[in-house]
Image (cartoon, rainbow, N blue to C red):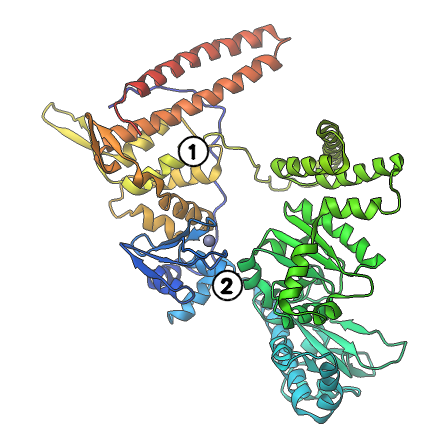
Amino acid sequence: MPHRILINTSNLNGAIFPTFVPMIDQATIDRIMDAAEISDVVSEFVTLKRRGVNMLGLCPFHNEKTPSFIVSPAKGIFKCFGCGKGGNSVNFIMEHESLSYPEALKWLAKKYHIDVQESEETEAQKQLKDERESMMIASAFAQKYFTRYLWEENEGRTIGLSYIRERELRDNIVKKFELGYCPDGKDTFTQAAQLQGYQMEFLEKTGLTIKRDDWVRDRFAGRVIFPIHNVAGRVIAFGGRTLKKDKNTAKYLNSPESDIYHKSRVLYGIFQAKREITRQDKCYLVEGYTDVIAFHQAGIENVVASSGTALTPDQIRLIKRFSPNITIIYDGDEAGIKASLRGIDLVLEEGMNVKVLLLPQGEDPDSFSRSMSSTQLQEYIEANQTDFIRFKTKLLLENSENDPVSKARLISNIVRSISVVPDAITRSMYIKECSSLMDVGEDILYTEIRKLMQKESDDLRRKEYRDQTARKLAPQPVQEQKVIKNLCEIEEREILRILLKYFHTEVFEEEGETPEETISISVGRFVIEEIENDGLYSDNELINKFVDLFRENLDNPQFKPSQFFINHSDQQLCQLASDLMSEKYVESKRWKKGGAFVESEDEVLDLLVPKIVQEYKLRKVKNMLSDLEKGIQLASDDMEKVLNLQNQYINLKKVEKHLSIQLGNRTITR
Ligand SMILES: [Zn+2]
C-alpha cells in the first residue's frame, strides 16, 4: 500500500450534474438495450467483416477507402479511428438516422418488436403533442393529395406537370421531392380533406386552409407544391409557386409559421441531403427550392436552401449536426453578394468553415447546373469556391485598387469577420492568410483583433451588469453550467478507464482485525478511497458524476461497470464510457515488471493502479501550485495574504517532491 498524502482541496466543489429524466421508462430502455446487439444494428447499414474478436467495416460517417470502423460485440460499442465517432447501439442510430435519444430508442424498439411504455405526461404536454401530431397528419394527407393530383388528375397534368416538364425535371426527382399540384378554385382541397375526416381546426392551424367568418378557401389553389420536410422526413409545411402571369399574385407562397413549422429552424432539402452531407463532410447552401432540386438532378445531393427567410443561426446549427463545412452558392447579383456577406459571419460565429461561390452574372444555381454535366459542375464548384478572406478581398478591392483608405477599410472588415471565429488556432490561420494576401504584418492584425475582442467582451460585461441589475428585481433564475477548462483531463480519463475495466479486480491485501486475517482490496475501492481521502474532485462535473456512480456501487457485486455506463440513459455518461473503452493504445504497450517484459496491463495492476493515482495527485498539486503563484502575484499589495499563500506554496512544494520521488521509485515503465 502506498503512503497516503492529504491534499487540502476544500476550495474545489463537487456539485452533481442535473439528472437526466428519460421519457421512456428504465425497464423498457433496458429491454431495448438487451435486444439491440451492436453488430446486428450496425450491419443493417454497414458491411462488417470479422477481425479476431471485433468486426471491421467502412465508416458510414466519413468518406474512407480503407476501413477504420470497428465494432466490438463483446463491449457492445462501435468506434471509428478515422473520424472519432463511437458509442453504443443507440448512439449509432442517433448519429446515422439523425434522431434524438428517445427517437433512436423508439427506432430500435420497433426493429426488435418491443412495446414502448412512455412515462406520464402532463395534460398540457399531451394536448400539445396531440395537436402537433394532428397537424403533421393533416400535412401528410395534403402532400399525398397534391402529389396524386399532379400525376393523376387532368388539371394537375395539363397545368402542373407541364410546367415541371418545361423546367426539364426528371420524374424520379419530382417524386423524390414529392412535388404536387393544388387544384385551382375556391376550396376543392379543403372539401376533399374534410370529406376524409380531417378537422377544420388543423387545416387552419397548418395554414392549408384560410377561414374567415363568411368564407373558406385553399391557400395554395392553382399552385405547384413543394412540400417542406423536417430532418426526420415528415412534411411540416409547403411552398407553392403560382403559374399565373398576374402581377398581383406572389410568385412563391409559403405556409405560415405554426407549432410544427418554424421557418428560421428549417432548411429545405435537409432530409434528402443529410446522409450525403455527412458522407462528403460538406454542405452546399443555395437560395431556393428549385436550386436544391436542380442540384439533385445534376447528381449533387449535399445541398440545402434557407428558403423563405434570410439565413439564421439555427439553420447553420442544423447543418453543423452533419458537417462543419459550408459552401455558400448564391447568384452573382447585388442581393446575392449582400446575402453571402451576411452568411459568412454567421457561419464563422458558429465555429464552422465557410467558402463562397458566386455564380456568373445572370445565372442562378438552377440554370447553371443545367448548363453542364454533374462532373463539370462539381469541378467548377471545387475550382471556383474561395475562402471568405479571398472572397471579401476580391469583392471589396475591385473598385478601389491602390487606394489606402479603402484598403484600410477592407482590412478592418476582414478582421471583424476573423474576430468572431471562436477557435484560436483557426483564427491564427486566417490571420496568416490575410497578412500575406493584404501585405500587412500579422502583429498589426493581431492587435486589431484583440481590440475588437476586448470591445466585444467589454460590451458583454456591460450588458451582463445591466442584466444583473435588472435580475435583482426579478426572481433568481437557475444558474447556468459553467465551462471550466479541465487541466487534469488526461489523468482523470486514465483513472476512469482503469475503474471501468478492473473495478472488482482484487489487487491489494490489508491487515484485518487479527494478524492472521487479511482483507482483499479491489481496484475500485483503492482508487475511490485514495481520491476521497485527499478530497480530490474534477473540474469536470461529468467526471465527478462518473466517480459518484462508482462510489455508490462499491459494495454491489452485481455492478458491471462497462455494461452499466454503456447502457446508461445519460448520453454524456454513455458517450464518455464508450470513448474510454475504445482507447486502444493501452493494449499495445509493453509493461516491464521485475526486469522482464509482460504483455498486458492486468499483470501489473498492483504497480499500475497506484502509479496512475499518484500521477493524478501530482498533476493536481502542480495545478494548485500554479494557481497559488498567480494568487501571490495578484495579492502583491496585501502582505498578510502573500505570506499566507507563500506558506501554502511551500507546503505543497513538499508534497510535490514527495509524490515525484514515489513515482520515480516505481519500477514500472511505460
Ligand atoms: Zn469515421
Residue 54 visible in rendering = yes
Location of the C terminus by quadrant is top left
Residue drawn 76% across the image and 54% down it: 340
**For mark 1, does the 10 Å Cα neighbourhood hold few (<14), some (14 to 19), or many (20 or more) residues?**
few
Q: Which residue is mark 2?
A: 97
Q: How far from the left and from the top, in percent, is residue 54?
A: 31, 55
Residue 119 visible here: no
- Residue 590 in the image: above or below residue 377: above
Q: Amino acid at mark 2?
A: Glu
Q: Is residue 375 left or right of residue 113?
A: right
Residue 568, given in percent of the width and then of the height, sits at 40, 51
Res. 15 mark: none
Measured in 3D between alpha carbons, the distance from the residue under mark 2 to the one under mark 1, in whole angstroms, is 32 Å
251 or 50, which lies in front?
Answer: 50
Image quadrant assignment for residue 375:
bottom right
What element does badge 1 sit on? helix
Q: Nearer the viewer, residue 353 or 223?
A: 353
* Side of 53 where 87 appears, left or right: right
The correct choice, above or below, for 69 with respect to 142 in the image is above
Residue 255 x %, y % = 73, 71
Quadrant, the N terminus: top left
The residue depicted at 63 percent of the width and 85 percent of the height is 197
The kind of residue on which mark 1 rests is Ile
Quadrant in the rendering for residue 365: bottom right
The residue at which mark 1 appears reads as 490
Q: Quadrant of residue 548?
A: top left
Quick one: label 2 or label 1, which is nearer the N terminus?
2
Q: For this view, does 521 lie left or right of residue 533? A: left
- What residue lies at 42% left-to-right and 70% top-to-bottom? 110
Query: Helix, strand, or loop for circle 2?
Result: helix
